[in-house]
Image (tube, rainbow, N blue to C red):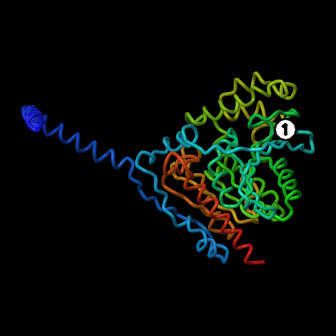
Amino acid sequence: MFNQRLITMSTFLCTLFCFPTPLLVTLLGAIITLIVYSKSLFKAREILPVIYYKDSALAAHILKKCRQLCTPFRPPLWLHNQHVQTIVSNFLLSRPAVRYDREYLLMRDRGVVSLDWALVLDRRIRETSSILIIIPDLTSDATSVSSLTQAASDRGFRVVVFNRRGHANSFLTSPKLQGFGDPTDLRQVVKYIRGVYTRANVVAVAIGTGSGLLLSYLGEHGSSAHIAAGVCISACYEAQEVLGKGLRSFYDFLYLFRLKKLLCSHAKALSDSCNMRAVMSSWTFKEFDENLYCKLYGLHGTDEYWEKNNPMRDVDDIAVPLICINSLDDPMFPKDFIPYELFRCYPNLFLVVTEKGGHCGFLENISGLSWADNLAVGFIEAVLDAQLKMK
């Protein structure tokens, strides 16, 4: 047996060294490079977050209490690309199976929104447990935020996902959809939750385009927002400068396509208020808004629509601690629109920026909690701790 192995090895070496020297060097170099590179693909690279804020007692407490603010973002090399981060997080990410109990809530105009309450068997959830409202991306649902739901539930939060009217496979009882930054429905939901859980704090995390709604709500209602803390992940600021224009990339096309797919199930309910054929044939955001939202709201054009739905219209009136998390390589909302000076002027506003992360990505692996989701929960816990000590 030993002699047979020796002969086999000798034959391999003889064959190997029969190659011309340049070819042999190239072959060995390729093998070594492949081995080294394959290891580096899964080796985490540290990306330090940059924080923008105004010095205050609140900021000092949060920086001390929220360790996640100083934790580097560590994506492996294969997750450095902005498109890989975006695509994996939106379509390929492995998420935990979370069960939800759906509740329908009737609005004042007879419209209906749905609330998906996370079902948790953990006894730590009490009447005084803080309630975390998650506002998903405009074309997403509770399934897309199950990792954040699970993590927040494990840390003692009662979690509910807010779905706009007609979204997330819910029915439409009135010929009206919620505008991009119209906080009317969210206001009624927050009041309802506060009325049921009178002893609990209410906090909110918004994802992607959902941040437009949260920014609008917090700005419009200021100190009476009845929300203790807020987080916007991959926040969209001057949304009208992006969504109010034509299609700039594949993501814009896909986003508009998913919106139209959602509308297919509501075509009959909306047909009396707008021309659905014109809506479905619109292939720019401007045309889409003109043919759908402007008709539903009785507005004269997109300028008037975005004047009422711009997330930044009342941002200087936000009165609760809020953190926005953005990546500089976000392919959907360019870094040029990040309002750095805003976060340097107001003591309750915080901004965290990373070089990598894509749109709603911030993944360090293909399973588990994202870096941004972990930071979101940590920030909220730090704010609630600060407010408890001030009482």
> Is residue 113 found left or right of 24 in the rendered image?
right
Q: Is residue 19 visible?
A: no
> Is residue 241 found left or right of 171 in the rendered image?
left
Residue 236 in the image, given as x and y percentages of width and height: 65, 49
SS of the residue under disc 1 = helix
Image height of 366 relative to 54, above or below: above
Front residue of 60/383: it is: 383
Front residue of 210/15: it is: 15
In the picture, residue 165 is in which quadrant? top right
Which residue bears the numbered disc 1? 297
In the picture, residue 20 is in which quadrant? top left
Decide: few, some or many residues near mark 1? Use Cα within 10 Å; few <14, some 14-19, many ≥20. Answer: some
What kind of residue is marked 1? Tyr
Image height of 81 relative to 269, above or below: below
Quarter placement of the N terminus? top left
> Is residue 350 found left or right of 30 in the rendered image?
right
Image height of 88 relative to 310, above or below: above
Front residue of 369/37: it is: 369
Residue depicted at x 76% and y 66%: 319
Query: In this view, which residue lies farthest toward the top?
Result: 277
Residue depicted at x 64% and y 75%: 61
Q: Is residue 378 visible?
A: yes
Residue depicted at x 23% and y 40%: 31
Image height of 175 relative to 311, above or below: above
Residue 104 in the image, given as x and y percentages of width and height: 85, 42
Quarter placement of the C terminus? bottom right
